[in-house]
Amino acid sequence: MKFSVIDKLFLLNALVARVTATPTSSSSLISVSVNPKAQFQEVDGFGASQAFQRAEDIFGKYGLPAVNQSLVLDLLYNKEVGAGFTILRNGIGSSNTSDSNFMNSIEPTNPGGPNAKPDYVWDRYNSGQFPLAQQAYARGLQTLYADAWSAPGYMKTNDDENNGGYLCGVTNESCASGDWMQAYANYLVQYARFYKESGVDVTHLGFLNEPQFAATYAGMLSNGTQAADFIRLLAKTIKKSGLDLKINCCDGIGWDDQEAMMAGLEAGPDPAINYLDVVTGHGYDSAPTYPLSTNKKTWLTEWADLTGDFTPYTFYNNGGPGEGLTWANHIQVALRDAGVSGFLYWIGAENSTTNSGLINLINNEVIPSKRFWAFAQFSKFVRPGARRIAAVSSHANVTVSSFENKDGRIATQLLNQGNSNVEVKVQITGLKSGASIKPYLTNNDNDLEPLASIAVAKGGSFQAEIPAWSMVTYLAV
C-alpha cells in the first residue's frame, strides 16, 4: 500500500498523540482520527460453524420449536434482525455412522483401493448442514467454506478417521493399500458437486483441521510440505471438474502453528501457495496478533472459549475468556493487527452448557450471548467487500478500528476498555458537515442498542460519550 506525504503525516501525528496521552478520566477528551484514504485489507465477512451435528440443534434435535428455529436463523444470518453472518463453515464428514456427533461421509465404505470406483452416497442432509446452508443463503449468506477434518479412515496411515494419522501418499507417508491422494481430492470435489447439483454453492474448499493435533475425534496430521503435496493435486482436480471453487488451507490450531506451515507452502519450483486463495488459522494455541507471512487473504476460521460454563449476560466483569468485551477485542486485534479478512467463532448456536457457542438453545429457548452481540457490532456494519481504513486513538484504553463499505458508508468501532465513561472527538477525513452518525451500543445493559443520531460538525468531526467497559459502533449514514 502506497501512502502520500499527507497520509504519512496523518498516521505519524496520530501515533504520537497516542503515545503521549494522559490517563483516562471522565473530563479528558480523547481524540480518534479516521482516514479513508489509507486503505488496507478487504473484508470477506464473519461467521461460525454448525459442524458435528450442531446444525441439527437449530432444527429441533432437542425440541426447539419452529418459531425459535426461525429466530435463531434470523439472528445468525439476517442483518436486519441479527448479526448478518456471511460465512458458514461446514464440516465435510468422514464417518460411516451418525452415532454421537459424528458427521457422515459421502463415501462411507472402502471401495477396495485408491483406484477402485468409489461408491458415493448423498442424502441432501449432510448432518443438518445442507438445509442450514439453504436457510443461510436465503437470509444473505455469501460464502460457504466446506472443510474436512479428516479423510475417511481407509485413506489414512492409521486406518482411522480419529487419532491423527496422515493421508496415504504425502511426503514420507505411505500405506500398503497405496496412494490415496487423488481419491481424496476426488472425494472433496464430489462433495462440492453434490451441493451444486442440489442448488447450493460451496465457494471455498479445505482438507485439514488443526493438523498439528492428534485429536480423539476426526482429524488428520500434516506439515506444510505435506499439505503442499495435496494442494497442487487438489487444484488440478478442481480445474478438471469445471467447478468454481477456491482452496483454503490449513486451519492450524493456533496462529503460530499456521505460520510454521508457511515455509512448506511457499517452497519448491511450483509453490503450493500459488494455488491457495485463503490461508486459514485458529486462535487456540496462539492468537492472531500479527500478519501471516503471505500476500494471500487470511481468515481466522475457529476460536472459542472452551473453558467454562455458559455466561450469556456478561459483556465485562473481570476480562474472562467468555466475556463480550474479550471477544470484541479479539476481533478488533485480528482485523487491525493481523490483517485478517474473515473471523469465525467455533459454533454459532447449540444446545450446550458451555461457551462454545455464540447463541445457546437450552430449554428450547434462544439465548444470545454478549459474545454474539460483540460479533454483531462488526458483522452487521462491516459487510463483504469493505476495506479496513486507517484509524488511531489518542488513548490506549480506547481502541479503534474503522472500515469503508462498498456503498461508501464508514463504520467505526470504539472499545472503551476502562472503568470510567470517556468523551471522544472523532475526526473522519472527508466526512461532510451535516452528515448523520448513528451509534450502536453494547455493554452489560445493552445489546446493539441504537442511540440518538449525531450531526457531524464542520471539518468532519463529532463528539460522543462512551460508557465504561463498552463498545460503540458509529455508522456514518
Image (tube, grey):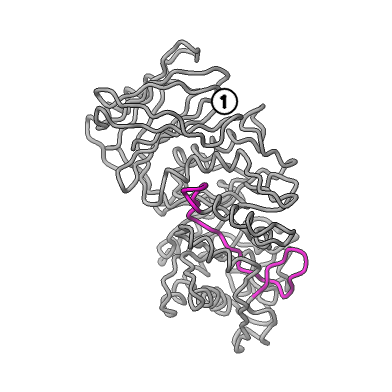
Q: Which residues are magenta?
A: 78-105
Q: Residue furthest bottom?
A: 117
Q: Which residue is mark 1?
A: 469
**Quarter of the rendering occupied by the C terminus:** top left
Residue at screen point 45% across, 75% down:
238
Q: How many marks do you count on the picture?
A: 1
Magenta highlight on residue 93: yes
Q: Is residue 455 visible?
A: yes
Q: Residue furthest left?
A: 5
* 360 horizontally vs 24: left or right: right
* 474 horizontally vs 157: left or right: left
Magenta highlight on residue 205: no
Q: Is residue 260 visible?
A: no
Q: Residue furthest right?
A: 99
Viewer-closest of 149 and 93: 93
* 371 horizontally vs 262: left or right: right
Residue 327 at x, y percent in the picture: 58, 38
Residue 200 at x, y percent in the picture: 49, 70
Q: Residue furthest top?
A: 27
Quarter of the figure with residue 124: bottom right
**Residue kind at label 1, given as amino acid type:** Trp
Residue at screen point 51% across, 43% down:
376
Residue 446 at x, y percent in the picture: 57, 32
Query: Is residue 197 placed above or below 339 in the rendered structure?
Result: below
